[in-house]
Amino acid sequence: MMEKAVPEARVASIAADRTASRMVEVWDLPLRLWHWTLAVCVLIAWFTPNVHDGLHRVVGYSVIGLLAFRLIWGFLGSRYSRFRMVAVRLRAAPRYLLNLRRGITGRYIGLNPAGTLMLVAVLLSLAVSGITGVMSVTVTFFGVWWVEDTHLYASDAVIVLVVLHVAGVVLMGVLQRANLIRAMITGRKRIRSYT
């Protein structure tokens, strides 16, 4: 029995369907508002110590409030806001980073393992910075060298991580031909469907 030949136009149509892209809801509105508000607060906090101490404290307390919200939202938020995959992605991060050196990015709708590692590092650094910042204005810890030094180093670490985060987003956007910044603004991410 002979197989029927498939016309070339139909083959091209099937190939196009296999790599068709579609928009998927990824980041919910509360998470996006949290992300951009945190970014603004971190930048303000970075430029205001010893110059505008009152503003520095206000945004510092705001960061602590935002961290508390993120912890809650990590359990109550939408699918890609939750922390349910953090442990799995953290274990996958070393291999992912090695593969990334070879240009192998994988496809993730939410955070990839490197993004998950960055999320944890930023949250921990911000927590240390915020807690030591609050400690440094109390009677007990005001002027205590290790509190001030820890606050300074944690704050510097946050800025280094922010720069790495932005570089990582740009790199992944180029490697995957995806506008990840737009996804964090609109909440929707274009993904390729492979059927």
Image (cartoon, rainbow, N blue to C red):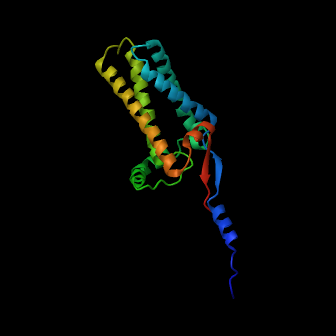
- Hey, which quadrant is residue 132 in on the image? top left
Front in this rendered view, residue 135 or 80: 80
Q: Position of residue 30 (x, y in %)?
A: 61, 33
Question: Residue 15: x and y, percent?
Answer: 63, 65
Residue at the front extreme, as displayed = 9
Q: Could you tell me if residue 50 is visible in this image?
A: yes
**Quadrant holding the N terminus:** bottom right
| Horizontal relation, residue 170 to residue 76: left or right | left
Q: Which residue is rendered at x = 47% and y = 53% of the image?
A: 105
The correct choice, above or below, for 66 with respect to 138 in the image is below
Q: Is residue 174 above or below residue 157?
A: below
At a point 53% along the width and 53% down the height, the residue shown is: 107
Q: Position of residue 110 (x, y in %)?
A: 55, 46
Residue with the most extreme bottom position: 1
Depth check: give the residue in front, 161 or 13: 13
Q: Quadrant of residue 163?
A: top left
Query: Is residue 115 visible to us here?
Result: no
Q: Does residue 44 appear left or right of residue 6 in this picture?
A: left
Q: Nearer the viewer, residue 170 or 135?
A: 170
Query: In this orientation, which residue lies closer to the viewer: 167 or 62?
Result: 167
Extreme-left residue of the structure: 145
Instruction: From this view, report whether residue 41 is shown above or below residue 171.
Output: above
Quadrant (top left, top right, bottom left, bottom right) of the C terminus: bottom right
Question: Which residue lies at the image location 49% right of the left edge and 47% below the top edge?
Answer: 172
Q: Position of residue 69 (x, y in %)?
A: 55, 29
Position of 75 relative to 16 (above/below): above
